[in-house]
Image (cartoon, rainbow, N blue to C red):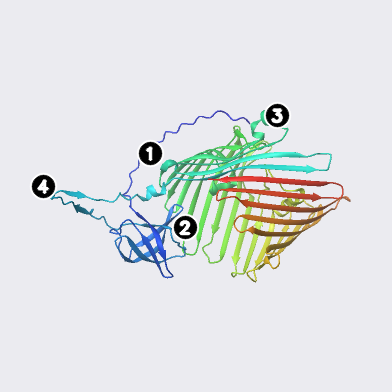
Amino acid sequence: MRTLPAIVVIILLCLSTPLRAQEKFLEGEISYKSSQNTYVKFSNTESISVGDTLYVKKDSDFVPVLVVNNKSSISVIGMAVGDIKLAKGDKIIAFPTAKKTPEKDIILTEDPEYNTEIVEKTTPAPRTKQELNREEQIRGKISASSYSNLSSSSGGSNHRMRYSLSMNAKNIDNSKFSAETYIRFSHNSGEWDEVKSDIFNALKIYNLAICYDANQSTSIWLGRKINRKVSNIGAVDGVQVEKQFGNFSLGAIAGSRPDYENYSFNFDLMQFGGYLEHSMKTKVGSMQNTVSFFEQKYKSNTDRRFAYYQHSNSLLKNLFLFASFEVDLYKLEEEVSKNTFDLTSMYLSLRYRVSKQLSLTGSLDRRKNVVYYETFKSLAFQILENETRQGIRFRVNYRPTNRISMGANVGHRSRKSEVEDSKNLYAFVSYRNVPGINSNATLSTSVLQTHYLDGMIYKLRLTRDIIPGKLFAGLNYSYVNYQYKFNDNELIQHIGEANVSWRINKKLSFSANYEGTFESSQNYSRLYLNLIKRF
């Protein structure tokens, strides 16, 4: 089922829950900052006391940053707490500890009759935490790109256009509704009939969803969305509900999967399941654990039933751990359904920062291969990526000086289907602000040994700011040498690349990228132009 039906969705959702008393706040602004003290200006400071803690809003949390040690009628002096760096103009939040009686001004006139009249002068009622969290925030970008592939071979050339829109609209009109989207429309020149035959040959909807925050702990999503807590299942076309209980989050998901061929809507591929997440934060770091169960259908038949576990941990200083596992709970053998417990996917990553200069990383990747619906990588780099994605890897990064950094990756992969193990090595050295040319230079090499080829790639990259903050340029040269083992074929390429990025203004930018690939028998040229408007 690859057509997009007309969908008219009417959501009438009425939730009535008792709310506890809402905490009021005052908003101020940093007017001056010295080496020891920070001065914050408010409309008034009557409800702020010496010793009170002041906060900044970070995402949906309130983070303590100052403790009041002195005050006047409209400003306070605070001493910094925590690690957040503050600057002049930053917004600061104060939560009053007690309700104050409004000021009353006596208006005196020449007529004694009016001298007894008292007029109350009050400041506007401060907004609540919930109202602050519901402030409208709309960010996004639209872009138009052209991709031209010019070839000296008989295959000729082609020209491709791509238009994209990404947007994140939080609390639209200060309401409980939010929306997000990421959509692309791409087509080749002269192939419009292919688009007319199936719009999804050109249109790719990666994200298109609306959210309703029923209360501070309950959210409901409708549409196509990838849930980061269960990202392994990919995009879901349907409903996602999440409820938070302190440090726990409980979620339920029901809908369908995108079509495998063109990423359209396919309601034959239904899926449903749920997840439970626990998260915690300390002064050092954080930890998240997520366990989920899902069943995926093909029409009315069970296609897959599996469990997923994900863990991330930075509670130990300078140490970060990430782990994920997938276990299949169902299989079909000779038309007979069976329960099973097979580990089908695993990923482990451990990173340790030994010092500011040295970091070590190790990983084990047993995940399924990634399927790209669109890619602009050349053949040589597609092979390199495919052969280095899975297996065991070790990485070391070292920065002996502020200008010099270097590193190396080594990987090994073993498969039953391959007669020989795959091995790979990547090493680089970078020098920042090379004297004489005022450019950053990186020299790297990649070595690849698989059951069907031996290959090497050498690459030199130069980058620099021509106009700091406005105009950026780069030059690349790569030498590719792939030797195939089962015949005399080889792939020898010289690849040159030049790119320039121009920040026209704060919200408008333009970039151009040229890549030329030169072989003994034929040459290729690719030109990529991109215009981005942010809002």
Image spot of residue 47 (x, y percent): 29, 58
Residue 317 vs residue 127: left or right? Answer: right
Of pointers 2 and 4, the one earlier in the residue sequence: 4
The mark lying in front, picked from 2 and 4, is: 4
Of pointers 2 and 3, the one earlier in the residue sequence: 3
Of pointers 4 and 3, the one earlier in the residue sequence: 4
Residue 321 vs residue 450: left or right? Answer: left
Q: CA distance from mark 2 to mark 4?
A: 65 Å
**Identity of the residue drawn at 63% across and 53% down:** 346
Q: CA distance from mark 1 to mark 4?
A: 53 Å
Residue at which label 2 appears: 280
Q: Is residue 421 visible?
A: no
- What's the mark number on residue 289? none
Of pointers 3 and 1, the one earlier in the residue sequence: 1
* Amino acid type for the residue under numbered disc 1: Leu
Residue at which label 1 appears: 15
The mark lying in front, picked from 1 and 4, is: 4
For numbered disc 3, what is the local secondary structure? helix
Image spot of residue 477 (x, y percent): 76, 56
Residue at which label 3 appears: 193
Residue at which label 4 appears: 113
Q: So how many labels did they put on this image?
A: 4
The image quadrant where one finds the N terminus is top right
- In the image, is residue 233 above or below residue 411? above
